[in-house]
Image: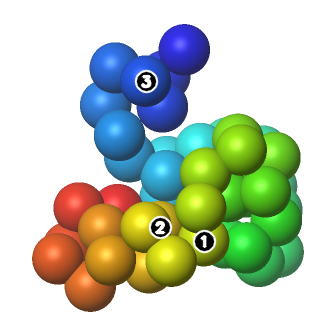
Amino acid sequence: MIYRKTWNIRAIHILLGHTKIESTARYLGVDFENALLLAERGEI
């Protein structure tokens, strides 16, 4: 729910304690390429 409201995959990454952002993206069912794009734009 947090991800859908904020689109902040980094926050979810920290909350879940994942070591890799790829794990968080997979857990959320988010395309990793999209997650990287958000990271590059500073949105995570």
Closer to the camera in the image, 43 or 26: 26
* Image-based side of 14 in relation to 40, left or right: right
Tally the marks. Answer: 3
Q: Is residue 5 above or below residue 38?
A: above
SS class of the residue under badge 3? helix
Q: Amino acid at mark 1?
A: Phe
Residue with the most extreme left position: 41
Which residue: 30% across, 68% down?
A: 38
What residue sits 49% from the left and 58% below the top? 10
Q: How many residues crowd around disc 3 within 10 Å: few (fewer than 14), some, or many (20 or more)? A: few
In this view of the protein, can residue 13 be seen by the observer? no
Q: Which mark is residue 4?
A: 3
> Label 3 vs label 1: CA separation?
16 Å
Which x, y percent locates residue 13? 64, 55
**Residue 39 position (above or below residue 40):** above
Q: Quadrant of residue 15?
A: top right
The residue lying furthest to the bottom in this view is 40
Label drawn at residue 42: none
State the residue position of label 1: 32
Residue 14 on image: x %, y %: 64, 54
Q: Earlier in the sequence, mark 3 or mark 1?
A: 3
Q: Nearer the viewer, residue 23 or 10?
A: 23
Q: Nearer the viewer, residue 38 or 12?
A: 38
Looking at the rendered structure, which numbered label has been put on residue 35? Answer: 2
Measured as percent of width and height from the top left, residue 39 is found at 34, 75
Any part of residue 41 in sight: yes
Against 1, residue 25 (above or below) is below
- Say what amino acid the circle numbered 3 marks: Arg
What is the x, y in percent for residue 43?
23, 61
Tell me how far mark 2 sits from mark 3, CA to CA: 13 Å
Q: Dot 2 lies on which element?
A: helix
> Mark 2–mark 1 contact, CB under 8 Å?
yes
